[in-house]
Image (tube, grey):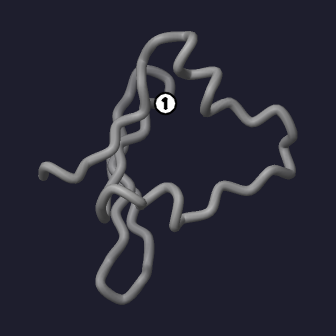
Amino acid sequence: MANLLTVPETNADKQKFAMVDRTKRIYSDTLFSHGDEVFIQHQGEQYRLRRTRNGKLILTK
């Protein structure tokens, strides 16, 4: 669990993750650079995005 990446909560830090251009891609290698799971805050709820051993993605609430 030491290799988890959580997106910052402050408005200034959220802007770093904002997508100005809706066609912009976020590559999974970048997203998972610190481990096999990340937590996503969305509308007051926390979701867990996990990469499996087979390279599949699983999103859970």
Which residue, as the protein is rendered here, is positioned at the far bottom? Answer: 54
Q: Give the image location of residue 6, x and y in percent.
A: 34, 37
**Which secondary structure lies at badge 1?**
strand
Instruction: Determine whether, in the image, residue 17 is placed left or right of residue 55.
Output: right
* Camera-nearest residue between 42 and 1: 1
Picture quarter with the C terminus: top left
Q: Residue at x 12, y 52 (%)?
A: 1
Q: Residues within 10 Å of mark 1 (few under 14, many from 20)?
A: few
Q: Residue at x 38, y 56 (%)?
A: 49
* Camera-nearest residue between 58 and 25: 25
Instruction: Determine whether, in the image, residue 2 is placed left or right of residue 37.
Output: left
Which residue, as the protein is rendered here, is positioned at the far top? Answer: 11
* Camera-nearest residue between 45 and 11: 11
Q: Is residue 8 above or below residue 10?
A: below
Q: Quadrant of residue 41?
A: top left
Q: Give the image location of residue 60, x and y in percent.
A: 34, 53
Instruction: Determine whether, in the image, residue 30 is placed left or right of residue 25.
Output: left
What residue is shown with label 1?
42
Q: Is residue 36 above or below residue 39?
A: below
Instruction: Determine whether, in the image, residue 40 is placed left or right of residue 60.
Output: right
Dot 1 amino acid type:
His
Q: Give the image location of residue 45, x and y in percent.
A: 38, 28
Q: Give the image location of residue 29, x and y in percent.
A: 51, 67
Q: Quadrant of residue 57?
A: bottom left
Number of numbered markers: 1
Q: Is residue 12 above or below residue 22?
A: above
Q: Residue at x 41, y 60 (%)?
A: 33
